[in-house]
Image (tube, rainbow, N blue to C red):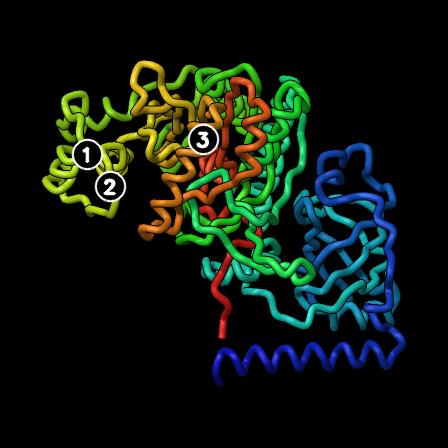
Amino acid sequence: MSEQQNSGDLRQVRIDKLKDLVNAGRDPYKVSKYEVTSNSQYIKDNYDELESKFVSIAGRIMSRRGQGKAGFYDIQDHLGKIQMFAKQDAIGEEEYKWLKTYDIGDIIGVKGKIFKTRTGEISIRAEEVKLLSKSLQTLPEKFHGLKDPDLRYRQRYVDLIVNPEIKDIFIMRNKIIKGIREYLDGEGYLEVETPILSPIAGGANARPFVTHHNTLDIDMYMRIANELFLKRLVVGGLGNGVYEMGKMFRNEGMDSNHNPEYTAMEVYKPYADFHDMMTLTENIVFYVAKKVRGTAKIEFQGKIIDFTPPWRRVKMQDMVKEYTGVDFDLINTDEEAIEVAKRKGLEIKPLMTRGHVISQLFEEFCEEHLEQPTFVTHHPVEISPLAKRNVQDPRLTDRFEAYANTWEIANAFSELNDPLDQRKRFEEQLRQKEAGDDEAHMMDNDFINAVEVGLPPTGGLGIGVDRVIMLITNQPTIRDIILFPTMKPLD
């Protein structure tokens, strides 16, 4: 018999049991409420004061032992497991007969008194047992569990039941997200909400998801960033700094640290620059690491990453020189740079410039060395359409990307507030798009109009929240810290 046939047969057995329950007037799905007065963890933590006291709990049957007129059942609620001891004399012959028909995975309510067994296990001596929901599916066998990663991500509800330790990861995720908000609120930033759907996908170089608005009969894009809306609010003078944390959507590849739908936080502060954003970045990550793990020295996959400020700061060109031997202070033309790119084996693309070569050399030869938290600064202007030019070298920008474990975890600028320069940058991005770059930035005339109204000198920062969570929770893939990651549908 195949596994699928066996699973189907077991399901039919459970359906037949359900029919027996319904015919006996015991339909569990008609139960709409059950009074719960305690939980497994509270009972174990407070046994001395609860001994012999009456409690009411609810949870899922995970195992059972014993035969005849008494049995032990492990009941799992949202905080753990506790043992129930059920005896025919205590709950009645009829109820005990039905209890013996219940399956692993069924959800029951239990009322009874707290005691310790002869082996010292804290338990509930049942006086009443009520079936609250019938499980028609068979849970994975407890000793092998649900191990297939693909199935775990597709059936997270089963994963949470049979691998309850993963709940800790998502509880830590919740604390990290709360911690980011706590820190920013404490610094006086105002949390706001901006559109997820927009006629223009702006604020980053990325390929967007496209949808259609039927009433307006226009294509719209799911946001790839919320930057341009947040800077509009800075123009309007809303608060002494604004931030938003939420979902972004990029129609791009999927791997261990990329999911098409992900969580990011962006913050903008008037009269600040990218140096202020460096301080803000390291302080936020330090704060949440200490809050959740109690230390800034985080173990990740066998190595220690130390988020204690200050983090290392290094210019992109200096890193390129260190790891490739190419000194771009001596290379001043696009032609010279492209010759370097050819020698280093880079792909030569249309409209490629000196700045593009610097960026690609960095990605190819430098990123892999950025294990400890590092700010890589002064990106070329060609790859930074929203960043202010560096005064000493206008070919570069006052921008940084923060790295840890070789991953980019944050991106920040001294924001470009020259509307004429901004228009030229967008026009150059349009030329890149026409040359085949699907990720080039779109023209946003309303945003330029907002900058013309007057954007003060502003520091802006975006943090990849999911990657920070991966590092702090020691999880190697982004799918392990997203409850429902994007998956290819099964046939």
Circles 2 and 1: CB atoms closer than 8 Å: yes
Amino acid identity at mark 1 = Asp
Are the two marked residues, 2 and 3, in contact with CB atoms closer than 8 angstroms? Answer: no
Q: Name the secondary structure under disc 1.
A: helix
Number of labelled discs? 3
Residue density around tag 1, few if under 14, some if 14–19, many if 20 or more, within 10 Å? some
Q: Is residue 394 shown left or right of residue 421? A: left
Q: Residue 295: give x, y in percent of width and height.
A: 49, 22
Residue 460 on image: x %, y %: 51, 25
Residue identifier under label 3: 422
Image height check: is 44 above or below 19?
above
When asked about the image quadrant of residue 179, the answer is top right
Q: Which residue was labeled with disc 1?
A: 334
Residue at mark 2 to residue at mark 3: CA–CA distance: 20 Å
- What residue appears at the point 74 percent right and 61 percent down from the top-left corner? 107
Q: Quadrant of residue 332?
A: top left
Q: Residues within 10 Å of mark 2 (few under 14, many from 20)?
A: some
The residue identified by callout 2 is: 352
Mark 1 and 3 residues: CB-CB less than 8 Å, in contact?
A: no
Residue at point 50%, 32% (across, down): 462
Q: Secondary structure at mark 3?
A: helix
Q: Is residue 70 above or below residue 44?
A: below
Find residue 376 and name its label.
none
Q: x and y percent of residue 443 in the render?
A: 47, 42
Q: Is residue 308 left or right of residue 31?
A: left
Give the mark nearer the N terminus: 1 vs 3: 1
Q: Earlier in the sequence, mark 2 or mark 3?
A: 2
Q: Residue at x 55, y 14 (%)?
A: 271
Residue type (three-letter) at the residue carrying disc 3: Gln
